[in-house]
Image: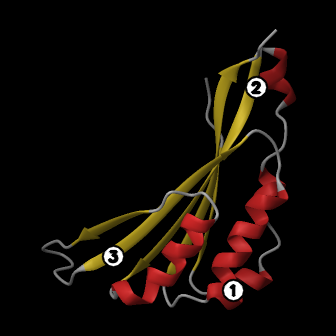
Amino acid sequence: MSRQIVSALLLCAPLMAAAATVPSDLMRPVPEEAARGYAVNWLLKIELESDNLSDIEPCRKVLADRGFLPTLSKTASSAMPQLHFKIAGVKQYEQADADADAALAAIQHAACPAVLTWTVESKHRPLVR
């Protein structure tokens, strides 16, 4: 079974405003999958990365308020010895939903100085008959 993954990487909020694609644009039915007896749920994943935790803390609250259950990870490596923070949250949708677009817009509006990445991924499930 193939998985369709679509992603957009935006380095700052002003670039986000110029982007033509929003999450709900990607959450469309897949007729070929339906013909094979599968439905598709959509996972919207929003991630923020920064070297400073206080930069992304307000966006963690926005994600939590919108039902994304954000998780915090801290990393460092020999290649990048400086401590690095990532906040990621995922929410599932059964179909295209303006709430997904509103969640992304809320993160944009919070203007956290961080690298913002969002991904829409399909998750197949058998059709209930």
As helix, strand or loop, the secondary structure at mark 2 comes to strand
Specify the label residue 109 is tagged with. Answer: 1
In the picture, measured across the screen, residue 48 lies left or right of residue 44, that is left
Tell me, yes or no, whether the two marked residues, 1 and 3, touch with CB atoms within 8 Å.
no
Residue 4 is drawn in which quadrant? top right
Q: Residue at x 51, y 59 (%)?
A: 89
State the residue at coordinates (52%, 74%): 61
Q: Amino acid at mark 3?
A: Phe
Going 77% across and 84% down the picture, which residue do you hit?
A: 17
Q: Residue at x 78, y 52 (%)?
A: 26
The amino acid marked with disc number 2 is Ala
Which amino acid does the dot numbered 1 rest on? His
Mark 1, secondary structure of its residue: helix
Q: CA distance from mark 1 to mark 3?
A: 20 Å
Q: Position of residue 40 (x, y in %)?
A: 73, 32
In the displayed structure image, the side of residue 40 where residue 81 appears, left or right: left
**106, above or below 24, in the image:** below
Quarter of the picture holding the C terminus: top right
- Return the residue at label 3: 85
Residue under numbered circle 2? 39
Q: CA distance from mark 3 to mark 2?
A: 35 Å
Q: Picture coordinates of residue 39 (x, y %)?
A: 76, 25
**How many neighbours does mark 1 have within 10 angstroms: few (below 14), some (14-19), or many (20 or more)?**
few
Q: Nearer the viewer, mark 1 or mark 2?
A: 1
Which corner quadrant of the image does residue 65 belong to?
A: bottom right
Mark found first going from the N terminus, 1 or 2:
2
Q: Where in the figure is residue 63, as x and y percent of width and height?
A: 57, 67
